[in-house]
Image (cartoon, rainbow, N blue to C red):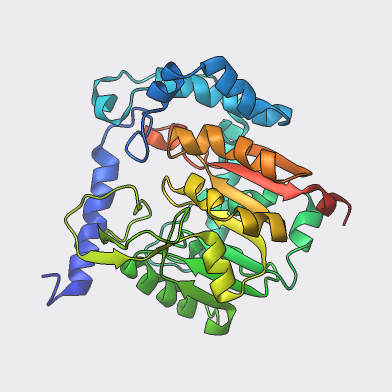
Amino acid sequence: MREYLPKFYFLAVEIKNKLTAVFQSDVPYITDSLGGSFKTYLHRGNKDQIVRNLKRGLDGQSKRTVDVLVQRFLAYPDENEKNRARVSSQPIGGYLPCENPAKRSEVDRAMVEVQSKFDITPKIYDESVFYYQHGLRLMPGSVVQSFRNKDFIDCGAYIGDSALSLSNLNFKKIYSIEISKKSISKYIFNMKKNQIGDEKYEIIEMGITSRDDREPLILPDTGSAGLSLVRKYGKYDYIQVIQKSLDYIVDEYKIKPGFIKADIEGGAYEMVVGGIRTLTNYRPVLSIAIYHNPKEFFEIKPYLESRLKNYTFLIRKLDSSLHRNHCHSEVVLLGYPNELKSN
């Protein structure tokens, strides 16, 4: 069916996925398949010191976000235990600002307008992308104004949703890094459908890692938002993925980044280690998803803080949902150089 009636095949897959989402348990759980268990990480280390290191220098809302999420990491079950857990009427740690019912209603209303503005296939409209714009909505206006004639590096480009959402922010060019051939095909289709010229973007088919001497990986191409260099199982077509550092990619493509967004399913720590020269030289604005594993969540901010001087860092959750792993999904580390505050 897939070979001879591909449209019907992918429609059937989409229907199956939606039905699965409807009937699976809504019990909150913590992702532990993309780099290890948060519980194990915290229990093996000095939990109080780990949390203090992360919270150092953060604003009040960031500290509150960290405290709530640590409570959830320790209280909610990991993936393999999720079906044994009981449903709680109130979220562990209470509501974060984005989870407040009034805020959720505001976001829902805004997303109706978003769906009328952008036509994407498949019709997946994440609020973190289209409402919060990966956290740019929460930053000073002067930060966004600094993007003129600079490039946007979209690490984990998926189907082009981020490129579309941020296409009006005066970037010189969008460089979209993606490993899935299936997602890249949909990306190109979505850009054409939304009348974004191919001179506005360039797709880089690579995986991002900390070093440039690693052998290519063979991975199943799920075509999903969760496709990762870390997850190596699945019943799909296999692809060969070249692995390079962010520094290599920036040099090779002569990119001058003003903004770097990264949501690469557990690989963000390796990305910043392999991109530290780029981050130091160009001082871009950052939005890095840190919720996939404990190394991302607890170690990226202290690492960057020790190397990027005069930066402001924030931690925010950009997802109003509380069911399943949405109880900690779409948590990002935002960063911008302090000189942009006065521009």
Image position of 282 (left or right of 215): right
Quadrant, the N terminus:
bottom left
Q: Residue at x 35, y 21 (%)?
A: 87
Q: Which residue ends up furthest to the right in the rendered image? A: 342
Image position of 141 (left or right of 239): right
Seen from the viewer's position, the closer of residues 94 and 32 is 32
Residue 172, compared with residue 58, is above or below; it is: below
Quarter-of-image position of residue 275: bottom right
Q: Residue at x 62, y 32 (%)?
A: 97
Residue 115, compared with residue 200, is above or below; it is: above
| Residue 62 locus on image (x, y percent) | 66, 31
| Residue 164 locus on image (x, y percent) | 55, 67
Q: Residue at x 87, y 57 (%)?
A: 343
Tally of numbered discs: 0
Q: Which residue ends up furthest to the front in the rendered image? A: 213
| Residue 188 locus on image (x, y percent) | 43, 76
Image position of 89 (left or right of 132): left
Question: Looking at the image, can residue 69 be seen?
Answer: yes
Question: Looking at the image, can residue 118 be seen?
Answer: no
Seen from the viewer's position, the closer of residues 337 and 275 is 275
